[in-house]
Each structure stands twice: as structure tokens, then as C-alpha cells.
Image: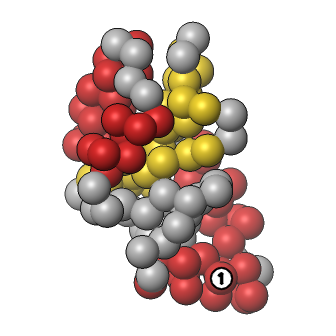
Amino acid sequence: MSGMLNFLLGLAVGEMQDSTEDNRKTAMNDKLANGTVDTCLAADTGKWETGICVESDHWLIVEKYADKKDAKRGHARWIKRVKSGVTKEELEELNDGNCADWAFGGTDD
């Protein structure tokens, strides 16, 4: 829940856009035949995280990392997983409530 509050607070004080633009400059983004893997330093949480979109515009945050080095390794692992044909349902099961999928169409439990 704190990630959502940080996000809303950032919007309220106008800091989110600049921070998001800076973070996108260091993002890793791979559009594959069966999904997109995106890893970035999230403006709302201040942590590196990987999000995956395998169906339309539904993004699921699947992993968070301590630093950029771990994020690069994690991003490469998720590329392999998506290439192997992972489904939205499998990602949600892997997520098991450890990361929020509220980014687009989910909930923040």
C-alpha cells in the first residue's frame, strides 16, 4: 500500500513526472513475440522491479531487486521465461501476493 501512497503523493507535489522520465532512461525493455518485459527503477517505490505484460495492457510486477546489477540478471531471466510461453495465470501464481499488480488493471493487496 505504501507504494501507491508514494505514487499519489508524488503526483500531488508534481515530482513524479521528472522522476519517471529519469528512471525510464535507465530502463530495460524487451518487446517479445508473446509479451513485454520491462525492468526499471520505479518512481513510486524507489526499487528496481520487473513488470511483464503478456495480455493486452495488463502489467504484473513479478520481481523486485536491491540494485541495478540484480535487476539486469533478473530481467534476463524473465526474458527467457516469457520466451518459453509463460501465461498471465502462471505469472499471477508466481507472484503469490509478493508484488503488487495494480499498475494496470490489478489490485494492491
| Residue 35 percent across, percent down from the top left | 54, 24
Q: Is residue 4 left or right of residue 87?
A: right
**Mark 1: which amino acid?**
Leu
| Residue 40 percent across, percent down from the top left | 48, 47
Q: Is residue 11 left or right of residue 99?
A: right
**Residue 17, picture quadrant:** bottom right
Q: Nearer the viewer, residue 58 or 11?
A: 58
Q: How is the image coloured?
A: secondary structure
Residue at point 54%, 17% (across, down):
34
Q: Nearer the viewer, residue 106 or 77?
A: 106
Screen quadrant of the N terminus? bottom left
Q: Nearer the viewer, residue 108 or 15?
A: 108
Q: Nearer the viewer, residue 10 or 77?
A: 77
| Residue 20 percent across, percent down from the top left | 64, 59
Q: Is residue 44 above or below residue 27?
A: below
Q: Is residue 76 above or below residue 65?
A: above
| Tally of numbered tags | 1
Residue at point 54%, 78% (across, down):
4
Which residue is under mark 1? 8
Does residue 78 appear anywhere in the picture? yes
Per the image, label 1 sits on a secondary structure element best described as: helix
Q: Is residue 91 above or below residue 31?
A: below
Q: Is residue 109 left or right of residue 68?
A: right
Does residue 68 appear anywhere in the picture? no
| Residue 78 percent across, percent down from the top left | 34, 29
Screen quadrant of the C terminus? bottom left
Q: Is residue 85 left or right of residue 108?
A: left
Residue at point 43%, 63% (across, down):
100
Dot 1, how many residues are within 10 Å of its Cα: few (below 14), some (14-19), or many (20+)?
Answer: some
